[in-house]
Amino acid sequence: MQAAVIVFPGSNCDRDVAVALARSTGKPPLMVWHRETELPKVDLAVLPGGFSYGDYLRCGAIAARSPVMRAVVARAKAGMAVLGICNGFQILVETGLLPGVLLRNAGLRFVCKDVHLRVETSESPFARGYNAGAIIRLPVAHGDGNYFADHDMLDRLEGEGRVAFRYVTSAGEPSAAANPNGSAHNIAGVYDQRRRVLGMMPHPERLAEEALGGTDGLPMFDGLVEALA
């Protein structure tokens, strides 16, 4: 499996996710600069976390209009897998590949801590390494992670099984206390209709080996290799 990491001015998790991908795939991903107009033939494109373009205008809005994103969007529509983490999630909603918006955190503060997530479905290349209903721990670090969509879209996401992860307590219960940003329905990540595009606020790459304090993110990358190889 060959992966690519799209690098924007202000990305700061590009190397973290590259290390996680290399560990699981056995080879380094291609690092693609945002000004490129072509995307190499890859099985997976990752939009990493960070503060692309300094979060000016609106988080992810400028990055979504970078030259390379035209190629990413076209390839995603043709079936390529795309993973957007944190700022990458914000970029994906700005491109229209995923529905909804990411608003300012309900508490109006930057949140940086570990959270518990419930895996809502394993029927996706991104969740193949998990069991549906599993409770995992991953870090979040964002100021604009409050997922919002209108009632009709939220009902559609729930009905079509497109909620990927949900913020929960350690016992697996969604609650206001377990929700770090005020996201509707405690949503931490969503899929497109084919579940080939995933946007999520938590960082699986930051818990992908024991040296980082845990491996709850590793099954995502290992599962992607199994599903896409």
Image (spheres, rainbow, N blue to C red):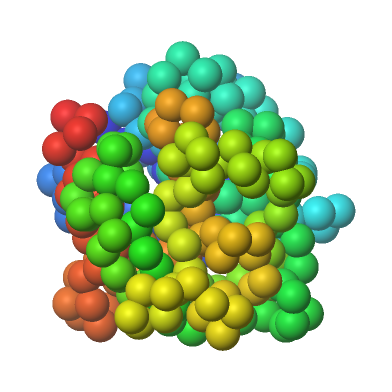
Q: Is residue 169 above or below residue 156?
A: below
Task: Tell me: residue 26, above or below residue 55.
Answer: above
Residue at 67% x, 40% y is 153
Quadrant showing the N terminus? top left
Task: Examine the rendering and report whether any part of residue 226 can be seen.
Answer: yes
Residue 98, located in which quarter of the rendered image?
A: top right
Give above or below for 100 relative to 85.
above
Answer whether residue 139 is visible to the viewer in this image: no
The C terminus lies in which quarter of the figure?
A: top left
The answer to whether residue 65 is left or right of residue 173 is: right
The location of residue 3, given as percent across then percent down, is 32, 36
Please tell me which residue is depicted at 43% across the width and 50% down the height of the picture: 164
Percent position (x, y) of residue 128?
Answer: 22, 44
Q: Quick check: 96 left or right of 224?
A: right
Q: Decide which of 194, 87 is in the foreground and name it.
A: 194
Q: Position of residue 105 (x, y in %)?
A: 72, 72
Tell me which corner region of the image, top left, top right, bottom left or bottom right, holds residue 26. top left
Q: Number of numbered discs present?
A: 0
Residue at image point 57% right, 50% down: 89
Relative placement, left or right, of 101 versus 199 is right
For the residue pair 21 and 8, the one nearer the viewer reads as 21
Residue 102 image position (x, y, % from top left): 70, 56
What residue appears at the point 27 percent right and 45 percent down from the top-left corner?
Answer: 122
- Residue 122 lies, with reference to residue 72, above or below; the image says below
Task: State the residue lying farthest toward the right.
Answer: 57
